[in-house]
Image: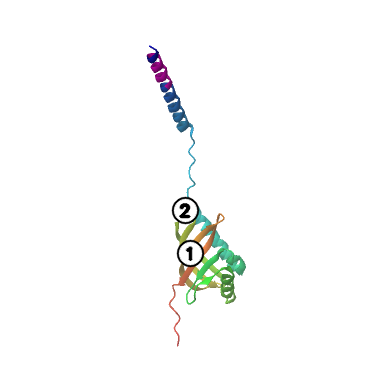
Amino acid sequence: MKTLNNFIIFTTLLLLCITIVTGCKNQTEETKEVTPEPTFDLTIAKAEIVAANKTFADLFVAKDSAGIANLYTQDAKFMMNGSPAIVGREHIQSVISSIINSGVSSVDLITLDVWGTEDLVTEEGELALYVGENKVDEGKYLVLWKKVDGKWYLFRDIFNSNLPPAQSD
């Protein structure tokens, strides 16, 4: 009889423990809040890049080569026709200053498309360079933008002209 009583007590305690554990597990699963992972929105990134291009164009008109250079990462590369890659903000500033001093007075940058992730976005675009009101060049570009401390910076900038090379006599 004692064995039967012990079996009943043990079985009751076992069922009670199973009920408590199962109930706690279900309660935890029901009350557990799901924190959504941040999602990357390419539309927002594109708008930020278009705004950065506007800043670039405004700084160009203002002849602010230092301001333009600060739109690039410290280790950026500026790659244009007929020149090796220009590396770093200081060198990029010097080249931009030379372009401005050559008489180019403004630049139009038109974003066509962007692709990428939350850290790197590639922009495809078209550009036009002006001396006064006269368009002196038009071309296309690809820019790899890098997000640093929540802000997009030009990381790799490559562009070339749509115009045929000048003929030498």
Sequence-wise, the earlier of marks 1 and 2 is: 2
Mark 2 neighbour density, 10 Å: few (under 14) some (14–19) many (20 or more) = some
Label 1: which secondary element: strand
Q: Quadrant of the N terminus?
A: top left
Mark 1 neighbour density, 10 Å: few (under 14) some (14–19) many (20 or more) = many
Q: Is residue 151 above or below residue 36?
A: below
Q: Is residue 74 visible?
A: yes
Query: Could you say where residue 152 lies in the image, as x and y percent from the top left?
Result: 54, 58
Q: Amino acid at mark 2?
A: Leu
Residue under numbered circle 1: 143
Q: Is residue 64 visible?
A: no
- Residue at 60% across, 69% down: 65
- Residue at 45% across, 30% down: 25
- In magenta stretch: residue 7: yes
Label 2: which secondary element: helix
- In magenta stretch: residue 23: no
Query: Could you say where residue 104 lies in the image, as x and y percent from the top left?
Result: 56, 73
- Residue at 39% across, 20% down: 11
The magenta span reads: 4-13
Counting the numbered discs, the total is 2
Dividing the picture into quadrants, the one containing residue 10 is top left
Q: Residue furthest front?
A: 2
Instruction: Depth check: give the residue in front, 126 or 72.
Output: 72
Instruction: Name the main secondary structure of what is drawn in magenta.
Output: helix
Q: Residue furthest top?
A: 1
Between the residue at mark 1 and the residue at mark 2, the CA separation in whole angstroms equals: 15 Å
Query: Could you say where residue 111 lies in the image, as x and y percent from the top left?
Result: 47, 61
Residue under numbered circle 2: 42
Q: Quadrant of the C terminus?
A: bottom left
